[in-house]
């Protein structure tokens, strides 16, 4: 038998390859936009007609191409982006296969004009179905303009397969979003049939999201930030109340490339568990930065599916980071102890005036007073209003009479709850707290009694707050009406300068740090004006000490020092609201169990332990 194997001619091979790269107009948009970005453009224009069926044009102001490169760029496997296989493991560009232009040119009419900075005249090339039909010198601005016309002109089956203009435009818009969202530093314009549909100026990530999705988006976004050895996560999630029934604003970007990852999507959704219904989708814009060698973007021809080396760790980090953001920005109902209302004691009803006309309030009643009234205990309790109950336990706080306390609860539980408060009211006040010896905040949880060390807990809360503010730069500052002048020595000044950026991030503002008298013009909201000097002094010395201990980052040392200095101390009275806030905020922390100096912040005394005492 005669030999039958032949090498396919290039244009046939290109057409076959094109089938993989170009499924629809949106694929061309993606490839052209990515090339423009790889070319270092700062301004990119996308022009489409008839949803890309008639024209897709991308005009950039990037590096452009020489005459030879312009011709070569349409050859298959022609790329300037990698030269050895090793380069594949350290990709910083979007393209690398050298296939896109060759594929597009195989199935469309392509018109390219390009010029580099060093060339005075540019090159104009026309290609139809892989064949160069014209090439000439042209006067054109620096950069590249590629117009793709009559897509699939030579593959009628493909052309017929295209969906309505509306659908194709939606696909194009999706691709445009994916590129524009991750490159806020590039200006984008997008025109369809002559009208501008997007005009995106250079911006920060948050603004870019708002420019793309509308100003209503701004209030919906909650920042996310985390840096670990495996991955750096930044970006935004949308508050749970704005979750949608349909998929839409879910974006993962890995090393500035849009990716799809059902697995990581699951991590995000699971962080929203309990906050949104199971058939709703949370919105998110998450930017993951990983070591390029730990990610394989090569497993899918259109490069949206990726493989991470350590997916399980990524999952865990992502989930906890998002949970944390939700908690930190008070998005989640943070106190969730699967509360058992049966465990509630009546003094939970803080500040609630129980309006019950048939009850007369005996405000002079004092349960600690040994009187003959004691014999009528239950009757008296029945008369006490919510306010009265609060007084009751305040007295307890002062005297810390443990015995009276136990009897109080035993005596009161049934009667008061049953008689004064309706079922509904008791539901509203699930989380009750009280302060013990101005040192602990006590609350009930399903498994028993929660005892929180107020000082350590607050240190933990502040530590995480400052740590995130230093990195996210979102501290709120109060401007001082009259700048405060403080003196520092050279060494202290040196330290202040070293930590100035972090301090600014959490809300401090200094006029200048050049002179030995420093003018403080703003401080974080929680620093009292009278305490500014002391706080800064201690901060400087703690920072010096902390840093010499080694192995901690500046942000950690500073946050630790600040939280130590500003936390609620043992001995401070906390009103009911503060107690509750303390409990809520502690459990919104990433690591609620330990203080920044690794000491226990709370303990739970189980019902079993309490039962044992009564054996
Ligand atoms: P890849 O992007 O994978 O390298 P392409 O076929 O998309 O392959 O592009 C081939 C080459 O053409 C690129 O490597 C690049 O050198 C050049 N090129 C394509 N588009 C542009 C552009 N807009 N500006 C400058 N150079 C470009
Ligand atoms: Mg490319």
Image: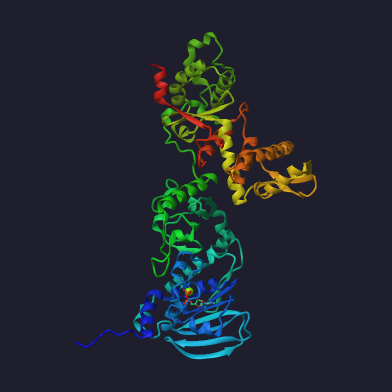
Q: Is 225 situated above or below 596?
A: below
Position of the N terminus, as image quadrant, is: bottom left
Which residue is depicted at the point 41% across and 63% down? 305
Counting from the top left corner in percent of width and height, residue 467 is at 59, 45
Which residue is depicted at the point 47% across and 26% down? 345
Give whichever of 439, 596 is nearer the camera. 596
Q: Is 30 situated above or below 566?
A: below
Give whichever of 563, 588 is nearer the camera. 563
Position of the C terminus, as image quadrant, is: top left
Counting from the top left corner in percent of width and height, residue 294 is at 45, 58
Give whichever of 394, 38 is nearer the camera. 38
Which residue is depicted at the point 64% across and 47% down? 475
Q: Is 373 situated above or below 311?
A: above
Total marks in image: 0
329 horizontally vs 278: left or right: right
Q: Is 300 situated above or below 229?
A: below
Q: Residue furthest left?
A: 1
Asked which colour scheme the image uses, the reply is rainbow
Kindly indicate the quadrant of the structure image that contains residue 534.
top right
Kindly indicate the quadrant of the structure image that contains residue 548.
top right
Q: Is residue 526 visible?
A: no
Kindly indicate the quadrant of the structure image that contains residue 365.
top right
Q: Is residue 569 visible?
A: yes
Counting from the top left corner in percent of width and height, residue 527 is at 68, 39
Which residue is depicted at the point 39% across and 78% down? 18
Counting from the top left corner in percent of width and height, residue 612 is at 39, 19
């Amino acid at each position: 038998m005669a030999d039958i194997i032949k090498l396919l001619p290039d244009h046939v091979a290109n057409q076959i390859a094109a089938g993989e790269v170009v499924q629809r107009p949106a694929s061309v948009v993606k490839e052209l936009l990515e090339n423009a970005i790889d070319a270092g453009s700062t301004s990119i224009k996308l022009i489409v007609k008839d949803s890309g069926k008639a024209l897709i044009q991308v005009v950039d102001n990037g590096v452009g191409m020489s005459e030879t490169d312009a011709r070569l760029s349409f050859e298959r496997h022609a790329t300037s982006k990698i030269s050895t296989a090793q380069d594949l493991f350290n990709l910083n560009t979007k393209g690398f296969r050298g296939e896109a232009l060759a594929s597009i040119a195989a199935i469309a009419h392509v018109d390219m004009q390009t010029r580099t900075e060093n060339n005075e005249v540019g090159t104009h090339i026309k290609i139809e179905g892989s064949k160069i039909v014209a090439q000439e010198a042209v006067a054109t601005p620096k950069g590249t303009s590629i117009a793709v016309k009559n897509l699939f002109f030579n593959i009628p089956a493909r052309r017929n397969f295209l969906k309505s203009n509306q659908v194709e435009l939606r696909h194009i818009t999706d691709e445009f979003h994916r590129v524009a969202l991750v490159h806020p530093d590039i200006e984008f314009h997008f025109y369809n049939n002559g009208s501008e549909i997007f005009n995106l100026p250079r911006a920060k990530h948050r603004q870019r999201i708002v420019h793309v999705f509308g100003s209503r988006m701004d209030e919906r976004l909650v920042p996310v930030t985390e840096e670990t050895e495996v991955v750096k996560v930044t970006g935004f999630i949308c508050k749970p109340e704005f979750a949608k029934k349909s998929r839409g604003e879910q974006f993962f970007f890995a090393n500035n490339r849009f990716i799809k990852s059902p697995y990581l999507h699951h991590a995000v959704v699971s962080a929203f568990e309990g906050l949104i219904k199971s058939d709703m989708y949370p919105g998110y814009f998450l930017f993951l930065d990983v070591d390029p060698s730990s990610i394989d973007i090569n497993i899918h021809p259109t490069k949206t599916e990726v493989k991470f080396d350590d997916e399980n760790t990524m999952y865990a980090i992502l989930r906890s980071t998002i949970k944390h953001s939700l908690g930190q920005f008070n998005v989640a109902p943070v106190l969730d102890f699967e509360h058992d209302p049966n465990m509630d004691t009546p003094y939970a009803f803080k500040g609630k005036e129980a309006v019950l006309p048939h009850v007369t309030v005996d405000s002079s009643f004092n349960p600690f007073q040994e009187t003959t009234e004691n014999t009528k205990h239950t009757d008296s309790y029945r008369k006490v209003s919510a306010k009265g109950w609060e007084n009751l336990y305040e007295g307890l706080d002062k005297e810390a009479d443990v015995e009276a306390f136990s009897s109080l609860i035993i005596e009161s539980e049934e009667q008061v709850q049953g008689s004064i408060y309706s079922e509904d009211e008791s539901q509203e006040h699930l989380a009750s707290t009280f302060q013990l010896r101005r040192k602990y905040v006590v609350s009930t949880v399903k498994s028993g009694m929660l005892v929180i060390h107020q000082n350590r807990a607050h240190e933990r809360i502040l530590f995480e707050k400052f740590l995130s503010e230093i990195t996210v730069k979102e501290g709120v500052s109060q401007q001082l009406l009259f700048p405060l002048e403080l003196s520092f020595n050279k060494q202290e000044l040196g330290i202040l300068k070293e930590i100035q950026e972090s301090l600014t991030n959490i809300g401090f503002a200094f006029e200048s740090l050049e002179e030995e008298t420093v003018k403080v013009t703003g401080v974080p909201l929680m620093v009292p004006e009278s305490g500014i000097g002391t706080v800064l002094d201690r901060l400087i010395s703690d920072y010096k000490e902390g840093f010499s201990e080694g192995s901690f980052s500046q942000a950690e040392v500073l946050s630790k020092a600040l939280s130590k200095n500003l936390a609620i101390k043992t001995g401070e009275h906390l009103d009911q609201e503060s107690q509750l806030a303390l409990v809520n905020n502690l459990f919104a922390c990433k690591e609620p169990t330990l203080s920044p100096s690794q000491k226990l912040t709370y303990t739970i005394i189980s019902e079993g332990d309490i039962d044992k005492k009564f054996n």
